[in-house]
Amino acid sequence: NPFGQRKKGKEGYAHIRDPTEDFYLRRMYGRIVDCWNRPISSAPDAWFDVMDRKRIKEPSGQDVAEIVNTGTSTRCLNLASYNYLGFAASDPYCTPQVVDTIGQLGVSGCSPRVLGGTTVAHTELEDLVAQYLNVEAAITYGMGFATNSSTIPALVGKGCLILSDSLNHSSIVAGARQSGAKIKVFRHNDAKHLDALLRQSIADGQPRSHRPWKKVLVIVEGVYSMEGEACNLKDVVAVSKRHRAYIYLDEAHSIGALGGTGRGCCEHWGVDPRDIDIMMGTFTKSFGSCGGYIAGKKPVIDFLRRHSPAHLYACAMAPGCVKQVTAALQVVMGLDGTGRGAAKVQQLHDNANYTRARLLEMGLDALGSWDSPVMPIMTYSPAKMVALSRELLQRRMAMVIVGFPATPLLLTRSRICISAAHSREDLDWALEQLDELATLCNLRHGNTALKAH
Ligand code: PMP
């Protein structure tokens, strides 16, 4: 890239240094963050209140101006949060249970799981997650990021091989690096390249006990958060099984969102969940809470209970957050007896597919797969980032602008996150605004190679 910041010999965007190290990027990002990284003062529902800010100092050479909240806020359409199923705001089934739980168990366990931090709510949730995913057992963690960064080093280490998709999340990159395993990065969603790397690394059909690697772990995501694209899971599973490699699937953006009943990428593609050795996911997206989980075979989960640092040494998930997920899962699984959960998943798919089809019709380059709630619109030019972020805010549209180093410099984009909470009127209004912005910022590239699939 023009700044020469990609570290030599490393692949993947997360390997690039922080933009604040660069003078020009620091100034540009300061202005973008000024627009969309404002505090919100209401729950992240279909609409939310975004604090108004003012500049109190002019830029002085090196740094951006100091910006403060004015005390007032503007109601904006929320196309930024990962509130896929609309559970993040108050819910008639979940919220009363969360309030009761906080009354009974307090706000925090103030302790790791193994030192008195495990409550009845934790064990109830772990059983429910395993039941939902149709696997033997599950373990929960206080943070999704730490779920990856602490589980991967617990499972693999020196003498092991990790094959990681080039667009894997920074928490996976952190865990893989910390593990000390040899890391090979395959081209994004390219099962052929994965196959080629595995062939280079292990002879065909070699039994696990005769290989140069203690363990071989393939790590992919269900939906890639900057691309909106579903993992090519069938091919990844076929290739990994052929080479007897373990599969680690991060479902942060696909659990609750993909598949007819929200069971994620396996359900979306018709893959047997028992073919996935480690199913990872977070509660911060579809379930409107905090925390993460690992699900799979009982011996693996028992092993993590004994060896995973985020389980042994970090505070357990807060009981109110645990209850929020349990209640939301019960709704999604239809255990509340209303059928609301199935309708929410269907609504999410309808909203996502409607918006994606309209964006493509408008000639915008909207990336991603059908049913996926993540929809990046390519802007390509970093120069458009500041103007676009300002225009979006002025039009009361909260949308995330993503650029280097989260993406390569010339693959800058603006990302929409769709929710089941959005009404058709909300989406039509947003599409009208985006149509005007497409003309204003010259965004109609009509790149047919990027058609949704
Ligand atoms: N994995 C992926 C793929 C993610 O996108 C994220 C965050 N968006 C995480 C893990 C970390 O999850 P959390 O935000 O719940 O800590």
Image (spheres, rainbow, N blue to C red):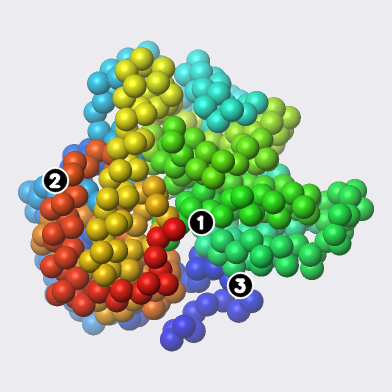
Mark 2 vs mark 3: which is more N-terminal?
Answer: 3
Number of marks drawn: 3
Is residue 222 left or right of 345 when viewed as pictured? right
Q: Which residue is mark 2?
A: 425
**x, y percent for residue 273:** 61, 36
Q: Which residue is mark 1?
A: 169
The image quarter in which residue 327 lies = top left
Q: Please report the residue visible at 59 percent of the width from the left and 28 percent of the height from the top.
A: 134
Circle 2 residues within 10 Å: few <14, some 14–19, many ≥20: few
Disc on the earlier residue, 2 or 1: 1
Label 3 belongs to which residue?
A: 10
Three-letter amino acid code at the position of disc 1: His
- Is the residue at mark 1 in contact range of ligand 1, meaning its CB lies under 8 Å from it? yes
Amino acid type assigned to the residue bearing label 2 in the image: Glu
Left or right of residue 247: residue 439: left
Mark 2 CB within 8 Å of ligand 1: no
Q: Which mark is residue 205?
A: none
CA–CA distance between discs 2 and 3? 45 Å
Name the residue located 48 percent from the left edge and 71 percent from the top edge: 17
Q: What residue is rendered at 33% in x and 68% in y?
A: 365
Taking the image as drawn, is residue 381 in sight? yes
Q: Is residue 433 left or right of residue 247?
A: left
- Secondary-structure class at tag 3: loop
What amino acid type should be assigned to the residue bearing mark 3? Lys
Q: Is mark 3 within 8 Å of ligand 1?
A: no
Q: Residue 441 location, x and y as percent?
A: 19, 75
